[in-house]
Amino acid sequence: MPDFLDEVTIHLKAGDGGDGVVSFRREKYIPLGGPDGGHGGRGGDVLLVADKSLNTFTTFQRNAHYKAAAGGNGAGRNKHGKDGADLHLLVPLGTMVRDPKNGELLADLVDEGQEFLAARGGRGGRGNSAFAKPTNQAPRIAEHGAPGEERALQLQLKLIADVGLVGMPNAGKSTLLSVISNAHPKIADYPFTTLAPNLGVVQLDDKTSFVVADIPGLIEGAHEGQGLGDKFLRHVERTRLLVHLLDGASENPLRDFKTINAELEAFSPALARKPQIVVLNKMDLPSARKAWQRVERTLENKNIPVLAISAATSKGVRELLQTIAETLATLPIEHTEELPVLRPELPEEVFTVERAHDGWRVRGKKAERLMAMTYWNEPESVERLQRILKQMGVFAALREAGVHEGDMVHIGDGELEWAE
């Protein structure tokens, strides 16, 4: 079984747009044909897609950098470049997408096939056929393709299951999961055998099924990082029902019950308020049969449903599954946490001017994109860039900031030398 990985940072680069071209129609009997430069194709997007067959980010452990295809370049005779293929990255259901800089939640992928546009491809540059006007019928203007978005994203996983199995290490959670479902967890008779959450589907009958998650590592101090608890406690936050398994071979099962509930409360009060069915396991052992009467009486006095089973012999397991199914039928489907109200993006025309160690730096989406898309070997393209920057107010802002003759002005990856 591959290592369980429930948090990872990935680096994405959408495809760059293809370049437009400067070209003119040249045929035998049409020596002075008009512009026919084709446009570049759009760069591919990067999308995250929720897939129910996954339950870990192990794939991203091997490769955390992904790049979508670039758009094709345009050509003469109005031939346009091909759009770059989108890149679809599969992630488990329950994937939360965050901005690694501030932790802001950007998306919560909980439904099969749900998509999140993680990085947008750059638009294709226009060929000179797009710039023909009555006043300029032979433009030598074209655009490079716009750069695709580049960003890092933090992915966190909260497994989605109907039922969460919780309890002290060695209570028999993995054994029970293997008996009731199609899961095949590693099982041994020592604490912390289970090092990752296991998911299993229980098919009670033709119409009734539910998903169970075995959550490892809960001991006293789990919410503070003792054992494995802090790593996996969040995976029970989405469950609708907790099945609290008590170890019948424990010296004090009721003390274990209090310990686990205290950890749930410390991690999340909402988690501690989830409905619980308490189950005393290992009734094939004399110690469990001896403890049963006290456990049953104590919990029933608190109006907590309590059952006794032996996962090893399957005694009482069918009754437990029936109780779980009946309880789930009375519980609402959990609503996913609402996404925060995202800050509106600034208009593309907005820019800032700041002093840099080697001149001046202009920052702004539109200004940087124009710089990247300009053909510097075509004077008309450069004149067009300067005209648009002036219309945007960039030149006036630089003058107001104190720019002088000969200063270097940096915009994106390009630079200009200031000259009045």
Image (cartoon, rainbow, N blue to C red):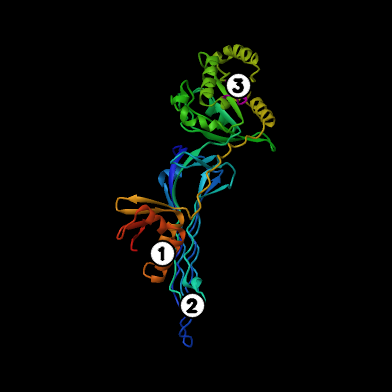
First in sequence: mark 2 vs mark 3: 2
Query: Was residue 180 drawn as part of the magenta stretch in this picture?
Result: no
**Image-based side of 178 in relation to 365, left or right:** right
Which part of the image, by quadrant, shows the C terminus? bottom left
Assign a secondary structure to mark 3. Answer: strand
Asked if 248 appears above or below 157 in the picture, the reply is above
First in sequence: mark 1 vs mark 2: 2
The residue positioned 46% from the left and 57% from the top of the image is 366
Whole-percent x and y of residue 147?
A: 44, 58
Is there a contact, CB below 8 Å, between mark 1 and mark 2? no
| Residue 313 found in image quarter | top right
In the foreground, 355 or 382 = 355
Q: Which residue is mark 3?
A: 278
Assign a secondary structure to mark 1. Answer: helix
For the residues labelled 2 and 3, the Cα–Cα distance comes to 82 Å
**Image-based side of 278 in relation to 225, left or right:** right
Magenta residues, start to end: 272-280
- Nearer the camera: disc 2 or disc 3: 2
For the residues labelled 1 and 2, the Cα–Cα distance comes to 21 Å
